[in-house]
Amino acid sequence: MAQLGEFPRVPETMDEDRSRTDDRVEPYIECRDLFKIYKRAELEVVALRGLDLVVDPGELIAIIGASGSGKSTLLNLLAGLDRPSAGQVRVGSRDLLDISDRDLVMYRRLEVGFVWQATGRNLVSYLSVRDNVELPMAMAGTKTGDRRKWSSELLAALGLEGKGDRLPYQLSGGEQQRVAIGVALANRPPLILADEPTGELDTQTAAQVFDLFTQLNDLYSVTVVLVTHYPGVAQYVDRVVHIRDGRISSESYSNPTFQRSGETVEDEYLVVDRAGRIQLPQALSEKFQAGGLAIVDSDGENVTMRPVGERPRPVRNSPLRRGRARPEERETTG
């Protein structure tokens, strides 16, 4: 893969950061108790409900979840396309809950690149491939010579050398998404966000697009957050974040099995947020439906949780209750 010039770099490589346990780097993305509420007529729809998320500088993660779980809402908040209702969300040095409209425009223009699922939202149909890539730079005031040099390097690195004069409709779906990635990288942002970037591509082409994200992340420590339904995404990212009902429910990691070359196993871990909340998998949560109560025990190292079953009934004839004076008795006594 060709060199892409210089991107904003983190102080140290991610391998060095992850090997240090005593001096961890500051997160690049940090969401705390994040809420997003949409008001439609007289109804309120809670898309995010107390979400916590931390992403390190240069990390590559994928967010997956069912339709309506809040994953696209989260991506829009991180992109500055929408504003949160409550909580905290910080990207780099930006506080996206308390940011002026002018600063928000500069943030979207220079500090984040976005790749949509539909190529029609990524590219201007009547502009050539090269002009599409150079458009964000022109809007940022980059000189013509610098724009041409950087777009040539990008197109070569993306495997599109010699196709700069073509229009988007003259490219395949995979090539159009590569151009979209080039547009997202045009102003060298430290953060790339992608909402279902392979949703309209076949499996082989989708794998090539994910591989491209991986190469870019490895070379320049560009932080990448992907929203996807692609089943094999774990092998291309550092971790997979599962979102359900507006909260992060679990994280999974792909690890080699050491049994056959190239084989991996995906380990999933439940997430306990800052408030101590945990989301059980659906199969386990059904065991708690009868009473809705649980007993939690700890032996110092292990924590066990078991359902109570039926909800306990209060003992109305207990000595404690008999010892309490009724309201009318308290008034008479007083």
Image (tube, helix red, strand yellow):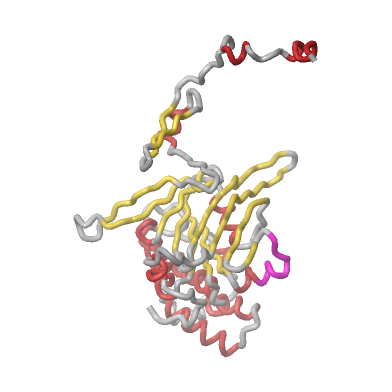
Q: How many marks?
A: 0
Q: Residue furthest left?
A: 259
Closest to the observer: 255 or 300?
A: 300
Q: Residue furthest front?
A: 334
Q: Is residue 323 above or below residue 193?
A: above
Please name the predominant secondary structure of the magenta segment in the image: helix
Q: Quadrant of the C terminus?
A: top right
| Residue 85 in the figure: left or right of residue 263 | right
Q: In the image, what residue occupies the spot 49% across and 61% down?
A: 55
Closest to the observer: 71 or 334?
A: 334
Residue 38 pos. (x, y %): 68, 47
The answer to whether residue 68 is visible is no
Q: Is residue 132 above or below residue 276?
A: below
Q: Is residue 268 above or below residue 299?
A: below
Magenta region? 98-106
Q: Quadrant of the N terminus?
A: bottom left
The image quarter in which residue 198 lies: bottom left
| Residue 85 in the figure: left or right of residue 216 | right
132 drawn magenta: no
Closest to the observer: 202 or 20?
A: 20
The answer to whether residue 146 is visible is yes
Q: In the image, what residue occupies the spot 56% across and 45% down?
A: 246
Q: Is residue 128 above or below residue 252?
A: below
Residue 62 pos. (x, y %): 45, 57
Residue 287 pos. (x, y %): 42, 28
Residue 85 pos. (x, y %): 68, 51
